[in-house]
């Protein structure tokens, strides 16, 4: 197994600092109008009153904590190390103790292994949390072998969900996403398979990830979509052009993955950072030496605002997302307890209307150079499903 190189990203002490309190004024619109009604079986725990996560949000009709926990790297980190399994369980359970009730996994993470870790972790309180997972890559249903391409054939979806239920130690998936659109399968057929699973009680809500816009419209018309998942952060604002306005039009929640820009927005990466072999960030052109030297100005901006608000750069970046729409629910992932606790406390950071406008203008003024994903990965985003014949 590859080990991190001596030039792997360093962890900034500012990122590790956990603050007892944070300043600022509230943006009332960020949490206004949230209903307390829950779907059947969706009991939501109360957050720790002193330093836990604050607020609840709605993804369509599904109520979740205002921040979730992405568990993608709990079987293998960006630097290709394997985290301690008991510590991953500890992070999952401590997140729950601090008010997190929304956990995000996928059959492709591991593959399969992350779902097992999450299922083990949430077992003591499964009925008090929302578990999300994803299907869509062509993965062997038994061995987890990753094949080339995608597979959203209805029969395969149903078999994939059976495996998810076993690995997650549960009788239902609260939110099931199509991980990427299969260009060979009409989205209406995908929705039909999910509808069948809903009738059996094995799936409660569904969503799409990184889909084409017309595919989202067709999917929602066939079977109401609860949430869309996409990369979205200060480092990548592409969804603001079309996906977020469409979600607002259709009443669909939005779940940003990589809300901290794969670690960049935490201050853990600087202009001299070089990535270990196997770290996908080393293949993203936004992190080439020349682009990194330019894009680091965004981190400098975050540092200025973190000093101004008495919090950390990561907390500013997450609070900026939370302030944008009351139905945006970021899912920062981590394999380190201090980082998880820090992320949770971002829900306590508030901006006045004037502060938010000022920060947003400053972020907009930073031109991020380079592509967000390698071409071999980016090609799977924004795909439109074929018409139904």
Image (cartoon, helix red, strand yellow):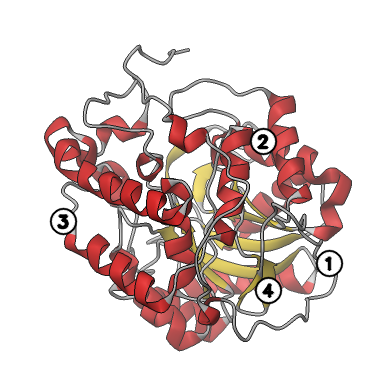
Q: What kind of element bears circle 3?
A: loop
State left or right for residue 97 relative to residue 364: right
Label 1 to label 4: alpha-carbon separation: 11 Å
Q: What kind of element bears circle 1?
A: loop
Q: Which residue is mark 1?
A: 43
Q: Please report whichever mark, 3 or 2, sits nearer to the chain's N-terminal start.
A: 2
State left or right for residue 172 relative to residue 317: right
Dot 4 alpha-carbon crowd within 10 angstroms: few under 14, some 14 to 19, many 20 or more: many
Label 1 to label 2: alpha-carbon separation: 32 Å
Q: Nearer the viewer, mark 3 or mark 4?
A: 3
> In percent of the image, x 70 and y 48: which residue is there?
164
Q: Please report whichever mark, 1 or 3, sits nearer to the chain's N-terminal start.
A: 1
Q: Are marks 3 and 4 in contact (CB under 8 Å)?
A: no
Label 4 to label 2: alpha-carbon separation: 31 Å
Quadrant of residue 145 within the rendered picture: top right
Numbered mark located on residue 62 in the image: 4
Label 3 to label 4: alpha-carbon separation: 35 Å
Q: Nearer the viewer, mark 3 or mark 2?
A: 3
Q: Which residue is mark 2?
A: 142
Q: Residue furthest left?
A: 290
Q: Which residue is mark 3?
A: 367
> In percent of the image, x 68 and y 66: which residue is there?
64
């Amino acid at each position: 197994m590859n080990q991190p190189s001596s030039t792997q990203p360093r962890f900034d002490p500012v990122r590790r600092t956990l603050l007892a309190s944070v300043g600022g004024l509230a943006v009332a619109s960020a949490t206004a109008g949230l209903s307390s009604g829950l779907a059947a079986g969706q009991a939501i725990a109360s957050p720790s009153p002193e330093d836990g996560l604050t607020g609840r949000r709605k993804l369509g009709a599904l109520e979740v904590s205002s921040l979730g926990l992405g568990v993608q790297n709990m079987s293998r980190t960006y630097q290709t190390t394997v985290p301690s399994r008991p510590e991953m369980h500890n992070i999952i359970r401590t997140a729950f103790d601090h008010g997190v009730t929304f956990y995000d996994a996928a059959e492709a993470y591991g593959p399969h292994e992350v779902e097992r870790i999450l299922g083990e972790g949430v077992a003591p309180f499964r009925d008090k949390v929302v578990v999300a997972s994803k299907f869509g890559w062509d993965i062997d249903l038994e061995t987890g072998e990753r094949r080339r391409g995608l597979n959203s054939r209805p029969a395969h979806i149903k078999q994939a969900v059976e495996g998810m239920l076993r690995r997650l130690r549960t009788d239902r998936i609260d939110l099931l996403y199509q991980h990427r659109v299969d260009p060979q399968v009409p989205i209406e057929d995908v929705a039909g398979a999910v509808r069948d699973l809903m009738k059996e009680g094995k799936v409660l809500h569904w969503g799409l990830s990184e889909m084409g816009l017309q595919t989202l419209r067709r999917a929602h018309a066939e079977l109401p979509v609860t949430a869309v998942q996409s990369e979205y952060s200060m480092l990548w604002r592409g969804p603001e052009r079309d996906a977020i306005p469409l979600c607002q039009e259709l009443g669909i929640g939005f779940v940003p993955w990589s809300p901290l820009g794969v670690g960049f927005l935490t201050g853990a990466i600087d202009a001299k950072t070089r990535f270990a072999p196997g770290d996908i960030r080393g293949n993203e052109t936004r992190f080439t030496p020349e682009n990194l030297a330019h894009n680091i100005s965004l981190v400098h901006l975050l540092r200025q605002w973190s000093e101004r608000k008495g919090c950390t750069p990561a907390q500013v970046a997450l609070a900026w997302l939370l302030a944008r729409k009351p139905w945006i629910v970021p899912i920062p992932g981590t394999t380190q307890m201090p980082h998880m606790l820090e992320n949770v406390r971002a829900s306590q950071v508030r901006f006045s209307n004037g502060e938010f406008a000022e920060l947003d203008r400053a972020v907009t003024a930073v031109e991020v150079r380079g592509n967000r994903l390698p071409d071999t990965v980016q090609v799977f985003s924004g795909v439109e499903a074929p018409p139904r014949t």
